Amino acid sequence: MYVKVTGNTEADLQRALRIFNKKVKEAGIIQEIYDRREYVKPSVKKKLKKEEAIRRRIRDDRKEQNRKKYNNN
């Protein structure tokens, strides 16, 4: 992954750095590094995945309730 820096000013470098950081974050590279720091047993992975799905479901339900609440008025 690379970002081409065009120009010689520091602003150009800062812009390229922001673009690079955004691409790295979207690709999930940093999260993968954190995940690989230590071994996680398959049973623990399964438990974490289930907990995340529950949190995501609750968050989505809350958002949907807020949409309905404000759209009905």
Image (tube, grey):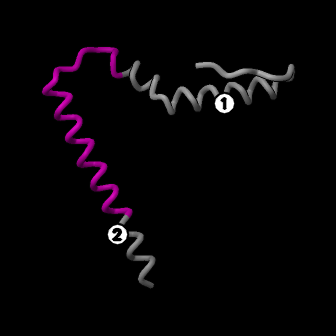
What kind of residue is marked 2? Gln
Question: Which residue in the protein does label 2 denote?
Answer: 65
Q: Which residue is drawn at 44% across and 78% down?
A: 71
Q: Percent position (x, y) of residue 73?
A: 45, 85
Task: Give the structural element (helix, strand or loop) at label 2.
Answer: helix
What's drawn in magenta, residue-wise?
Answer: 35-63
Residue 46 quadrant? top left
Graded by Cα atoms within 10 Å as few (under 14), some (14 to 19) or many (20 or more), the crowding at tag 1 reads few
Question: Which residue in the protein does label 1 denote?
Answer: 18
Residue 23 quadrant? top right
Task: Give the structural element (helix, strand or loop) at label 1.
Answer: helix
Image height of 2 relative to 25, above or below: above
Q: Which residue lies furthest to the bottom in this view?
A: 73
Q: Mark 1 or mark 2: name the one nearer the start of the chain.
A: 1
Q: Percent position (x, y) of residue 47?
A: 17, 35
Q: Is residue 25 left or right of residue 12?
A: left
What kind of residue is marked 1? Arg
Q: Residue 54 magenta-drawn? A: yes
Residue 70 quadrant? bottom left
Graded by Cα atoms within 10 Å as few (under 14), some (14 to 19) or many (20 or more), the crowding at tag 2 reads few
Image height of 35 relative to 72, above or below: above
Q: Nearer the viewer, residue 5 or 11?
A: 5
Image height of 11 relative to 60, above or below: above
Q: Residue 28 magenta-drawn? A: no
The Cα atoms of the two marked residues, 1 and 2, are separated by 35 Å
Q: Which residue is drawn at 38% across and 74% down?
A: 68
Q: In this view, does 11 lie to the left or right of 43?
A: right
Q: Residue at x 23, y 36 (%)?
A: 49
Q: In this view, does 33 lie to the left or right of 45?
A: right
Q: Percent position (x, y) of residue 66?
A: 39, 69
Q: Which residue is drawn at 63% across and 19% down?
A: 2
* Contact (Cβ within 8 Å) of mark 1 with mark 2: no
